[in-house]
């Protein structure tokens, strides 16, 4: 090979090697930057702890109105669904015959009273004559027996009058308490009260006040009793504990009452304790039979830590939060949650006030991986995005 050609080949080989080396340097892998996430410290706020349950409303008083005497319905003195006061006349059952019996009984009582007075006078004369031996013991005993018999007849006549008065009063069926009367189940002119079983005329239901029945678990019972003991309250102070009620269609708990009753023992079969609240219901918003939400405060408000509820995750181990540590590494933190306050969730344990909780970009945060945290206030953070 000629020297000139050899030099040319050498230069070409060096140029190609240099080009390949340059191409190799340009294809080196460069790691992507850490994913950006939004973090915020927990919000500090005073929060009241509540015991929450589902219950049902029930009437304080509810009863059937029945015919206690036999007769024809003479008048129906209300309209179906009327709200009435205690003592309002609702039905009239043929009172004339019972009024006549009452008058007969009163007349018999007057006659028996007159007979007693006469017998008493006869007895008194015999009693005065006997010490002077102006009468016999037989006459005295006869006068005594006549007086006692007359007294018995008067007592019987008075009892008959009272019974006749009761029967006459029963011909006027009145409301036993304030309430709403249901539709009547009898008509004017219908014969009622003639069977062994009393005839039901209608029903009356009291709506104000109204009961709310619910059950609480054994653990909740222990919590309530422990809180009452901590605050120095006795079991009989239960009626001072506030109960808040909300319908399924309502936001929050707009109705307020007090606890009224708690069963003396926990049911062995269900592990729950029956409880009851009572509340005023003047506007009749609550009707018996409604399913309602119930919450009972467990003491005064306490300092709490809250995070956006959407920042929480869950797995087979329970609920957790994703935390960014000092090295900007994501950690999965197991937590115990409390009440929901608007869009914020109370964290009972598992998080500290200075922790950086991931509130946005959760899908980009992988435990054990590094992230680029962007700080913002948890109270003003937008809903977390996964």
Image (tube, grey):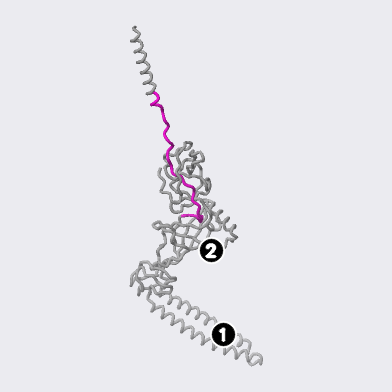
Callout 2–callout 1 Cβ contact below 8 Å: no
**Residue 159 drawn above or below residue 260:** below
**Is residue 38 magenta-colored?**
yes
Q: Quadrant of residue 37?
A: top left
Residue ID for mark 1: 147
Residue ID for mark 2: 240
Disc 1: CA contacts within 10 A as few (<14), some (14-19) or many (>=20): many
Q: Position of residue 189 (x, y in %)?
A: 33, 72
Q: Position of residue 380 (x, y in %)?
A: 43, 51
Q: Quadrant of residue 95?
A: bottom left
Residue 239 vs residue 2, the one in the foreground: 2
Residue 65 vs residue 43, the one in the foreground: 43
Residue at (64% x, 93% y) in the render: 134
Quarter of the image with the C terminus is top left
**Is residue 385 magenta-colored?**
no
Residue 93 vs residue 71, the one in the foreground: 93
SS state under label 2: helix
């Amino acid at each position: 090979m000629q020297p000139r050609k050899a030099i040319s080949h050498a230069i070409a080989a060096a140029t190609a090697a240099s080009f390949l080396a340059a191409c190799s340097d340009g294809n080196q892998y460069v790691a992507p930057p850490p994913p950006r996430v939004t973090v915020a410290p927990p919000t500090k706020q005073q929060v009241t702890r509540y015991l929450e349950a589902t219950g049902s409303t029930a009437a304080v008083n509810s009863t059937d109105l029945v015919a206690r005497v036999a007769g024809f319905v003479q008048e129906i003195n209300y309209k179906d669904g009327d709200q009435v006061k205690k003592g309002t006349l609702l039905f009239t059952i043929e009172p004339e015959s019972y009024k006549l019996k009452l008058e007969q009984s009163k007349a018999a009582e007057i006659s028996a009273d007159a007979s007693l007075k006469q017998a008493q006078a006869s007895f008194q004369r015999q009693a005065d004559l006997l010490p002077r031996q102006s009468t016999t013991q037989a006459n005295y005993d006869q006068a005594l027996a006549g007086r006692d018999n007359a007294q018995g007849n008067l007592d019987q006549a008075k009892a008959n009058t009272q019974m006749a008065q009761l029967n006459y009063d029963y011909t006027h069926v009145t409301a036993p308490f304030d309430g709403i009367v249901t539709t009547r189940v009898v008509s004017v002119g219908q014969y009622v009260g003639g069977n062994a079983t009393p005839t039901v005329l209608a029903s009356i239901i009291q709506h104000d006040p109204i009961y709310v029945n619910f059950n609480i678990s054994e653990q909740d019972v222990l919590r309530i009793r422990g809180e009452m003991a901590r605050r120095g309250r006795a079991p009989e102070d239960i009626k001072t504990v506030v109960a808040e009620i909300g319908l399924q269609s309502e936001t929050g708990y707009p109705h307020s009452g007090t606890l009224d009753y708690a069963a003396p023992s926990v049911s062995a079969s269900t592990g729950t304790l029956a409880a009851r609240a009572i509340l005023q219901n003047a506007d009749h918003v609550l009707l018996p039979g409604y399913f309602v939400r119930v919450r009972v405060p467990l003491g005064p408000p306490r300092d709490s830590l809250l995070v956006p509820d959407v920042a929480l995750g869950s797995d087979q181990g329970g609920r957790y939060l994703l935390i960014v540590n000092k090295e900007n590494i994501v950690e999965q933190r197991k937590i115990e949650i409390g009440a929901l306050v608007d869009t914020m969730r109370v964290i009972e344990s598992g998080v500290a006030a200075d922790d950086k909780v991931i509130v946005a970009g959760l899908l980009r945060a992988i435990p054990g991986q590094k992230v680029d945290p962007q700080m913002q206030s948890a109270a003003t953070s937008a809903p977390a995005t996964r």
